[in-house]
Amino acid sequence: NAGVMQNPRHLVRRRGQEARLRCSPMKGHSHVYWYRQLPEEGLKFMVYLQKENIIDESGMPKERFSAEFPKEGPSILRIQQVVRGDSAAYFCASSRDSPPYEQYFGPGTRLTVT
Amino acid sequence: KQEVTQIPAALSVPEGENLVLNCSFTDSAIYNLQWFRQDPGKGLTSLLLIQSSQREQTSGRLNASLDKSSGRSTLYIAASQPGDSATYLCAVCTDKLIFGTGTRLQVFP
């Protein structure tokens, strides 16, 4: 049973470009969470999604960031017009059901904005 | 608003020592508390999960306790080894996971 998959593992973008981060949850999991870890900081919750629904986006920046989890395919975190401050590690987690079911984390995508 | 604090921020010890890492949280209304390990540039490895109704959990040389009423958890590492060097994160689960900023542990031979 494969774990949570994230790709790419490393992503380099120039300022102003778009970044797309993908997350495939564990088999049987329909709940996905995105977290961001800025350099030298802890992980911060961004968004919680179920299939085709955003449940909680209280941690998402108001502009340039969006997330989706379509009926088919992986969850996507999209960052438009990236800036240097977006450089961070982005982690995805999945769970079988809603909190407080245990979340399992992927290896992360490290985004570098040049 | 739930806040999670971990002390110390960093710890450097010789191999073989027994260690205690501390985690405190401001709101006792949690479902569970989880301890993770993160190696540099890597993802998170779950170590122990304690349900709010439990007092402790053990796995090998690791023991985690939870005192929900006082808003505290400790992670005890027995007989530390250089391979234990990593950042240790605690997270409380409410309707989401809220993480502390971590304790960076270095165990030297």
Image: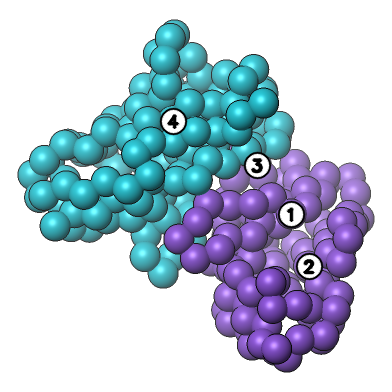
Chain colours: A cyan, B purple
Name the chain letter of the residue that bears numbered label 4.
A
Q: CA distance from mark 4 to mark 2?
A: 30 Å
- Give the mark, 2 or 1, whose residue is nearer the N terminus: 1
Instruction: Identify the image quadrant of residue A64.
Output: top left
- Give the mark, 1 or 3, whose residue is nearer the N terminus: 1
Q: Are the residues flagged by discs 4 and 1 from a single subunit? A: no
Q: Which mark is residue B47?
A: 1
Does residue A12 lie above or below A48 as drawn? below
Tell me the mark number nearer the camera, choosing from 4 and 2: 4
Tell me the mark number nearer the camera, choosing from 1 and 3: 1
Q: Are the residues flagged by discs 3 and 2 from a single subunit? A: yes
Q: Which residue is mark 3?
A: B94
Few, some or many C-alpha atoms within 10 Å of disc 1 (few <14, some 14-19, many ≥20)? some
Residue B4 seen in render: no
Q: Are the residues flagged by discs 2 and 1 from a single subunit? A: yes
Q: Amino acid at mark 2?
A: Leu
